[in-house]
C-alpha cells in the first residue's frame, strides 16, 4: 500500500510540474502575441529581405564588331537597394530627414510607402553606392535596411537606346521594358523568385516562402555593329539639329540576309538615366511608327510595272503635266508638261503622273497585289516589341485616285523596317527577306544557338531587279544634283522622297510639314548594304534631296571604307 501511495503522489507531482510549465508557456505566448505582439511583428518584418529578383541572374546583351569579340552593351553591376519595413517604423517623418541627408529621397513617396502597414517591405531606392549603404546602416534603425544587389548597367549609355531597351520595376518586380530587354526578357532572366526570411518571421507574418528551382539564363548577341551605330547616330543628331527636325531615323541592313547593321533614331536617351528622360523617346519609331513615305515608293511601282510586263525599260508615255481621277487632279512638282518621256525619265524627274500611268497600264488590282507581296501591310517579324502593321486600306477602294496616290507614296503608310525590307528586294535579286537583330544566343553551358528565320520569298524576277537597279544607278549618276555625288569607284542605286504629312487637327495634309525619306544600296548589282534614312518635319529645305543627300553619302562612304568594299567600276 505504501508503494501505491508513493506512486500516486509521484504522479501528482509530475502532473503539477507539467501544469506549471504549461501555464508558464501560455503566459509567455500571451505576452509575445498580445502584450508585445506589435514589437515582435515589427521585428519580424524588419528581418524580411525582398524576393531575389529576376535581375540577379540576368544575361548580358552584346553588339558584334566587324572584327573581334562581342562588346557588352547591357550587363550586371554591383549596387545596393534601400528598403523599409512599414510595420517596423515608429517615426516616419524623422526617419525621412535622416535618410535624405545621406541620399536624396522623394518625401511624398517615402511617406506613402511608410504608411502601408500590411507590406513587409517597400523599395525606396536602387543603385546605391556602397558608401551610401554604409552610412544608412550606421543609423541602426529597425525597419530600414540596405542589401547588395546586381543592377542593370549600360556601358554605352545612349547608344542604340530604343533598340536595346532597359530594366524597370513593375509593382516591385524588375523586368525588361522596351527593345531587346523586353522582347527577350524571359530568355535573359532567371524566372525563379525567392524569399530569404527568418523562420520565425515566416510564422508571425504567415507568408509563403516557397522557392522555385533555378533555370538557365542566356546572353544575346546583336547584329548591330558598334562603330557603324556610333557614326550613324552622330549623323542623325547633327541632321536633326541642323534642320530642326522633330525626329530622324536610320536603318542599315544587308539586303541579301536581312541582318541589321544599324538601327537608330534621334532624339534618344541615356539608358542609365531613363527616369529623367522623355518617355516619348523610349519606343522605337523604326518598328512602331507608320509613315506615308512619298516618292521612294515610285521605285517599287516601276519595279512592279516591269515585273508584271505592263511596261519595259524602253516604254514611253506622254506627260501632259497632270492626270485626272475621280474628280481630282494630280500634278508633278514642277507643274509643267514634259511630253513623250521614257520610264527612266519618270524616275529621274520623280513624276507623279508617270507612276500613275504605270498603274493604269498594270490595272489597279495587279498593282495592289504587288504592294501586298512586298509586305508593306505586314509586320516583318523583326522580333522587337510594338511592331506596327502598315496601313494599305486605300487599296481596297473602288476609286482609281487612291491607287494613283499610292503609286507615289501618299495615302498608304508603312513602318520604316517594312519599307527597308521591300526596297531591299529591288537590289537582292527580287527576294523579300526577314530582318533580324539577334545574331546568336549564348547559353551558360557553352551552347550557342542561331535563331531560326523564315526563308526569303521571291517577289520580283531577277531580271526586274537588274533593270530597276540600273535605272536607280542612273538617278545617282545623272539626276541627283547633276551627278555631282556619284562615286567613281562604286555604283549606288538610290531614290529620294518627300511626302506631305497629315495634320491631326484638320485630318488634311499639311502644307508645311513633310516627311523626307531616302534610300540607296551599293554596290548596286550585288549590294552589301541598303541604307534608309527619314526625317519628320525638317525645316529650311523642302525636299529630301536637299537635306538627306549629304548624310546619306557620308554614311555610304564610311561603310565603303570601313568594310573595304571592293570597287565595282
Image (spheres, grey):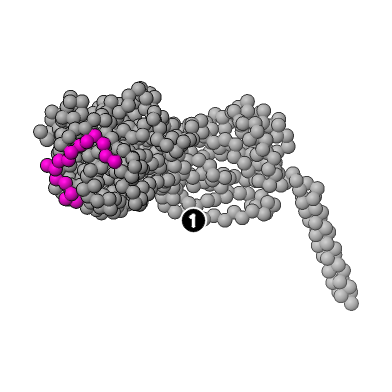
Q: Residue at x 58, y 31 (%)?
A: 134
The residue indicated by pointer 1 is 213
Q: Please tell me how many numbered marks the rendered image carries.
A: 1
Judged from this view, the residue extending furthest toward the front is 327
Image coordinates for residue 189, horizontal then vertical, percent: 44, 48
The part of the image, by quadrant, that contains residue 347 is top left
Query: Range of the magenta residues?
Result: 308-324
Q: Is residue 322 magenta?
A: yes
Q: Nearer the viewer, residue 243 or 312?
A: 312
Q: Is residue 406 magenta?
A: no
Left or right: 419 with respect to 150?
left
Image coordinates for residue 208, horizontal then vertical, percent: 61, 55
Judged from this view, the residue extending furthest toward the left is 569
Q: Residue at x 25, y 38 (%)?
A: 353
Above or below 216: residue 255 = above
Image coordinates for residue 229, horizontal then vertical, percent: 32, 33
Q: Nearer the viewer, residue 349 or 286?
A: 349
Q: Nearer the viewer, residue 111 or 36?
A: 111
Are there few (<14), some (14-19), or many (20+) residues within 10 Å of tag 1?
few
Above or below 208: residue 122 = above
Amino acid at each position: 500500500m505504501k508503494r501505491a501511495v508513493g506512486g500516486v503522489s509521484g504522479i501528482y507531482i509530475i502532473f503539477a510540474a507539467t501544469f506549471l510549465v504549461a501555464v508558464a508557456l501560455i503566459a509567455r505566448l500571451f505576452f509575445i502575441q498580445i502584450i508585445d505582439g506589435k514589437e515582435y511583428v515589427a521585428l519580424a518584418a524588419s528581418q524580411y529581405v525582398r524576393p531575389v529578383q529576376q535581375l540577379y541572374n540576368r544575361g548580358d546583351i552584346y553588339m558584334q564588331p566587324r572584327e573581334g569579340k562581342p562588346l557588352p552593351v547591357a550587363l550586371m553591376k554591383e549596387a545596393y537597394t534601400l528598403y523599409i519595413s512599414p510595420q517596423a517604423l515608429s517615426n516616419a517623418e524623422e526617419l525621412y530627414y535622416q535618410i535624405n541627408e545621406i541620399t536624396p529621397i522623394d518625401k511624398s513617396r517615402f511617406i506613402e510607402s511608410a504608411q502601408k502597414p500590411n507590406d513587409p517591405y517597400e523599395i525606396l531606392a536602387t543603385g546605391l553606392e556602397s558608401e551610401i549603404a554604409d552610412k544608412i546602416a550606421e543609423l541602426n534603425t529597425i525597419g530600414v535596411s540596405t542589401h547588395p544587389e546586381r543592377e542593370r548597367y549600360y556601358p554605352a549609355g545612349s547608344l542604340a537606346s530604343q533598340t536595346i531597351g532597359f530594366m524597370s520595376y513593375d509593382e516591385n518586380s524588375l523586368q525588361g521594358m522596351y527593345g531587346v530587354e523586353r522582347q527577350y526578357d524571359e530568355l535573359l532572366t532567371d524566372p525563379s523568385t525567392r524569399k530569404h526570411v527568418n523562420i520565425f518571421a515566416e510564422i508571425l507574418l504567415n507568408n509563403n516562402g516557397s522557392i522555385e528551382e533555378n533555370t538557365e539564363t542566356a546572353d544575346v548577341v546583336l547584329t548591330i555593329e558598334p562603330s557603324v551605330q556610333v557614326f550613324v547616330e552622330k549623323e542623325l543628331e547633327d541632321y536633326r539639329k541642323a534642320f530642326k527636325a522633330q525626329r530622324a531615323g536610320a536603318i542599315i541592313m544587308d539586303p541579301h540576309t536581312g541582318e541589321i547593321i544599324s538601327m537608330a533614331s534621334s532624339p534618344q536617351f541615356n539608358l542609365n538615366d531613363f527616369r529623367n528622360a522623355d518617355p516619348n523617346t523610349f519606343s522605337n519609331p523604326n518598328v512602331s511608327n507608320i509613315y506615308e513615305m512619298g516618292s521612294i515608293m515610285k521605285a517599287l511601282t516601276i519595279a512592279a510595272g516591269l515585273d508584271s510586263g505592263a511596261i519595259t525599260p524602253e516604254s514611253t508615255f506622254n506627260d501632259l503635266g497632270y492626270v485626272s481621277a475621280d474628280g481630282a487632279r494630280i500634278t508633278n512638282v514642277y507643274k509643267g508638261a514634259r511630253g513623250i518621256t521614257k520610264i527612266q525619265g519618270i524616275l529621274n524627274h520623280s513624276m507623279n503622273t508617270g507612276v500613275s500611268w504605270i498603274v493604269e497600264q498594270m490595272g489597279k488590282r495587279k498593282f495592289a497585289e504587288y504592294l501586298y507581296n512586298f509586305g508593306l501591310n505586314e509586320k516583318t517579324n523583326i522580333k522587337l516589341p510594338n511592331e506596327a502593321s502598315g496601313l494599305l486600306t486605300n487599296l481596297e477602294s473602288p476609286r482609281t485616285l487612291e491607287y494613283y496616290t499610292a503609286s507615289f507614296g501618299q495615302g498608304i503608310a508603312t513602318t520604316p523596317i517594312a519599307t527597308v525590307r521591300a526596297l531591299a528586294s529591288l537590289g537582292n535579286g527580287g527576294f523579300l527577306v526577314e530582318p533580324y537583330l539577334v545574331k546568336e544566343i549564348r547559353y551558360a553551358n557553352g551552347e550557342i544557338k542561331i535563331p531560326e528565320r523564315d526563308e526569303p520569298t521571291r517577289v520580283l524576277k531577277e531580271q526586274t531587279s537588274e533593270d530597276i537597279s540600273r535605272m536607280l544607278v542612273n538617278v545617282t549618276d545623272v539626276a541627283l544634283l547633276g551627278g555631282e555625288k556619284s562615286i567613281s569607284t562604286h555604283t549606288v542605286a538610290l531614290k529620294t522622297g518627300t511626302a506631305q504629312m497629315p495634320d491631326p487637327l484638320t485630318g488634311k495634309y499639311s502644307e508645311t510639314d513633310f516627311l523626307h525619306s531616302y534610300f540607296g544600296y551599293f554596290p548596286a548589282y550585288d549590294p552589301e548594304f541598303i541604307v534608309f534614312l527619314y526625317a519628320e518635319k525638317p525645316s529650311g529645305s523642302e525636299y529630301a534631296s536637299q537635306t538627306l543627300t549629304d548624310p546619306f553619302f557620308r554614311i555610304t562612304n564610311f561603310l565603303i571604307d570601313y568594310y573595304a568594299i571592293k570597287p565595282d567600276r
